[in-house]
Image: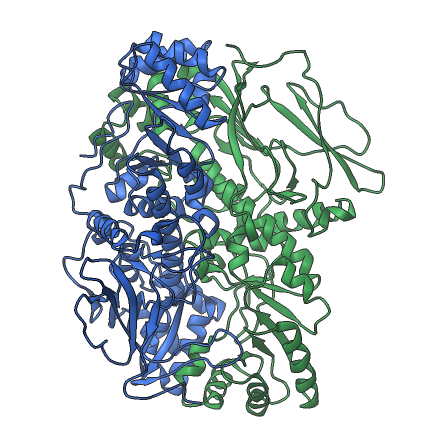
Chain colours: A green, B blue
């Protein structure tokens, strides 16, 4: 599968094992990827009996990053894996005991911990807007509160990267994007970045483990070091072509680009797969390179560019004769918005709405239901939320929340990464045209919160 | 150890197992946390025999993030662990074979891979400047090139976070900082953030796994959800005090802060450990809270504030009656600089200097040696680099590079995380006073590159 064809960019293909969001690849316990206070809250709630109260927590963003027009749900598949791996083994319990983080009663409870509640959420790959209830976790306080840190870590990271990636995909148009940012972020975060980028429509990743874990096509040929290793650029190109074939991509900007392209075509012939330029004024260099390649008869040789590209640089290259892009840093740092601003808030206790009320960061109590309204043409017009009851249906409404976990068990046959990728593609098509603009603006569609039904308001003091 | 005293912020203490940078806690193979092209380069270099050439790679930053005055070396301990875990097991080899990433000869080579070269570097906790040779990796091309992605992932992430954290520690003065940003970044990156923050002088972290893995004190008591869970704020405070003692920290801004503080002192008495305020105008609220606490006789009750704090917000709170800070988002995203801009460049092949020369991103060939010059008072004045030979010694010079790995084996008795923390504290004290300013400026000391000795220049074409 995913033929990472020698020397070339791999063609996307499905994972043979139906991986993507449904396979658990890393069995390490995730239980300690958790803030200290989640366990001290549990300790105190067990002490006074409130730990058994039925609670609903919601994940949402108060706002989108400045000027962004939509968010992208990403990380759901990883999160469901991580919830399954949220178990306190003997080593972990021993550590908590030794540090006196919690008392004996809490340790007993944690020893048998297994999330047994329900999770609903927007499907991975769906877009979202301010206050969209992306994820709803229902269960006892004891079982739901301790998931807060892990839920937010995964969703805040992956949604941030996916949202940036989606803008880059829009900016790149039909040209394929290679994700190559692993070296600019934490080594494990890099995997999630590759996954989020692929979800958003990137063609491939440089990261081998992301390829193994999720069936994402991987790509890559050579760096400047390979040229510098050799006695001459010609020797380097000859070695690469001998090993990887003429379909490979030769990096031509180590010394002089014009000389590099001439040497590349001399060595590989006019059927050379591609040249890559990683520095300089890429728009100017691409035009020169195309002219030179054509003059050498290498009319089918593609031009791949990389080097500090973000969605704006990609858009600026739209008219240049470029055939593919490598994107690194700006992808893994969310192109200016490295975290998605999602929060995990308690909104119902034993069926009654609760909410923080003081100063700033006030919340809206009560469980939210969400639909997206559409014109008959299929264009989205509005996100409608209702508190405590479903949104009264109108033609063109699409329900946004689906069951993900029931009674602690993952719902079977959830979409895999490849299906989620297609969902995002369709969701973006459904937005009003200016929702895909790269410039700063308002959310692509407004969010309306219907009055609570029945009329309940605020939290209980 | 690390008494995470119930309800309070733990006092720092050393890890009993001498952990920190010297213990390997996660035995997973790190070999696939690697860009595809590292292995295709190896494949091609094995094919033409250049894979055995002796190479030197250097890690450095061309510039610091805009306006920053110093960088901080962080992640070295994690990196040395990761290099030891860089092995290709059967599963990994099978994946590479199946995907046709490399050929049979390369698979054979990878099966026996074990880094056998040398690594030198600035000690973890040392500061650095543009072009400082933070890390030098020497070995065959085959063994050194494949480490590029992993080296850069770890150092780019951890150095970025540590540099932001160091500025926050400066801004906080003597007041303790709690790192609580786990929920705003990837769940594994969060651990490295906690570690980098502690290295930089944070007092504690909310992250339990970081506490377990590296002996970092952990802290935390309760969130708004705990108050909302209860029928009243009073019930919540009473439950927390019953479970965690009067020394706990009560979160008083769920409903009305003045009422919350009154209730907190009524419930816990005037020996209440601390109150936390997580929203609103913290400077104003802290003054009001201090006055109210004092009027209630709770003169020893500390005030902890949190909520969107960065180094500038911390500096602005210097005159407010605050006793401690919780910092989250801005820490884990590097406070505007989420990656450190480090590169891993081939600078020598078989003893001759090599360098990229075209357009932008040109490099200086040759292995760099580095010292920091100081006045007799101990204040640093200059970073001096020499190419290909040691820097001629002057009084007050401090050599910056130390052996980390020799012949593939970690040098024994390297400083642990706690020692590195002390090193950074001393390094920052040695900077000229304006080097610690938060405002945008130039590097705290200039870097001088001495002419190559003997005179060699550029790469071999």
In front of the other: B240 or B434: B434
Residue A119 at x, y = what percent?
54, 30
Residue in view at x 37 percent, y 76 percent: B346
Which residue reaches farthest top? Answer: B266
Q: Is residue B199 above or below residue A447?
A: below
* Residue displayed at 26% across by 63% down: B122
Seen as rendered, the residue at the extreme front is B376
**Placement of B148 over or under B301, stated as above or below:** below
**For residue A379, what is the image quadrant?**
top right
Query: Picture coordinates of residue A217 (x, y %)?
Result: 55, 62
For the question of whether residue A112 can be seen, the reply is no
Say if A454 sits above or below A343 in the image.
above
Image position of A30 (left or right of A205): left
Numbered-mark total: 0
Position of residue B267 measured from the top left corner of the image (x, y, whole percent): 34, 8
Outermost residue, bottom side: A266
The residue lying toward the viewer, choosing from A136 and A354, is A354
Observer able to see residue B394: yes
Point out the residue furthest to the right here.
A376
Q: Quadrant of the N terminus of chain A?
A: bottom right
């Amino acid at each position: 599968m995913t033929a990472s064809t020698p020397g070339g960019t791999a063609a996307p293909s499905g994972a043979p094992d139906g991986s993507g969001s449904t396979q658990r690849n890393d069995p390490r316990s995730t239980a300690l990827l958790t803030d200290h206070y989640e366990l001290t809250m549990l300790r105190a709630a067990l002490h006074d009996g409130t730990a058994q109260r039925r609670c609903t927590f919601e994940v949402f963003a108060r706002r989108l990053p400045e000027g962004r027009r939509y968010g992208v749900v990403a990380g759901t598949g990883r999160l469901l894996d991580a919830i399954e791996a949220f178990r306190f083994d003997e080593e972990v319990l021993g550590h908590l005991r030794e540090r006196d983080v919690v008392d004996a009663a809490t340790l007993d409870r944690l020893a048998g911990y297994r999330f047994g509640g329900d999770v609903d959420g927007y499907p991975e790959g769906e877009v979202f807007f301010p206050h969209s209830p992306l994820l709803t976790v229902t269960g006892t306080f004891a079982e739901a509160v301790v998931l807060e840190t892990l839920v937010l870590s995964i969703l805040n990271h992956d949604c941030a990267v996916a949202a940036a990636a989606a803008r880059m995909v829009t900016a790149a148009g039909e040209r394929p994007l290679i994700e190559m940012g692993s070296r600019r972020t934490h080594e494990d975060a890099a995997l999630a970045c590759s996954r989020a980028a692929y979800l958003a429509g990137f063609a491939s990743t440089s990261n081998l483990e992301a390829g193994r874990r999720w069936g994402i096509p991987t790509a890559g040929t050579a760096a400047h070091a390979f040229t510098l290793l050799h006695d001459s650029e010609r020797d380097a190109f000859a070695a690469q072509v001998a090993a990887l074939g003429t379909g490979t991509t030769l990096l031509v900007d180590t010394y002089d680009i014009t000389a590099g392209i001439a040497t590349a075509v001399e060595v590989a012939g006019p059927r050379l797969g591609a040249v890559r330029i990683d520095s300089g004024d890429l728009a100017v260099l691409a035009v020169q390179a195309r002219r030179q390649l054509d003059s050498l008869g290498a009319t089918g040789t593609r031009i791949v560019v990389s080097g500090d590209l973000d969605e704006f640089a990609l858009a600026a290259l739209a008219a240049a004769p470029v055939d593919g892009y490598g994107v690194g840093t700006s992808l893994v740092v969310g192109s200016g918005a490295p975290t998605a601003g999602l929060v995990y808030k308690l909104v119902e206790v034993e069926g009654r709405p609760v909410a923080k009320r003081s100063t700033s960061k006030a919340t809206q109590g009560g469980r939210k239901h969400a639909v997206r309204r559409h014109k008959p043409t299929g264009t989205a017009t509005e996100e409608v939320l209702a508190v405590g009851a479903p949104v009264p249906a109108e033609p063109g409404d699409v329900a946004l929340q689906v069951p993900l976990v029931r009674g602690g068990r993952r719902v079977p046959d959830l979409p895999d990464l490849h299906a989620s990728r297609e969902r995002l593609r369709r969701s973006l098509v459904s937005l009003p045209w200016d929702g895909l603009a790269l410039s700063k603006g308002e959310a692509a569609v407004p969010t309306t919160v219907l009055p609570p039904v029945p009329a309940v308001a605020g939290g209980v003091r």
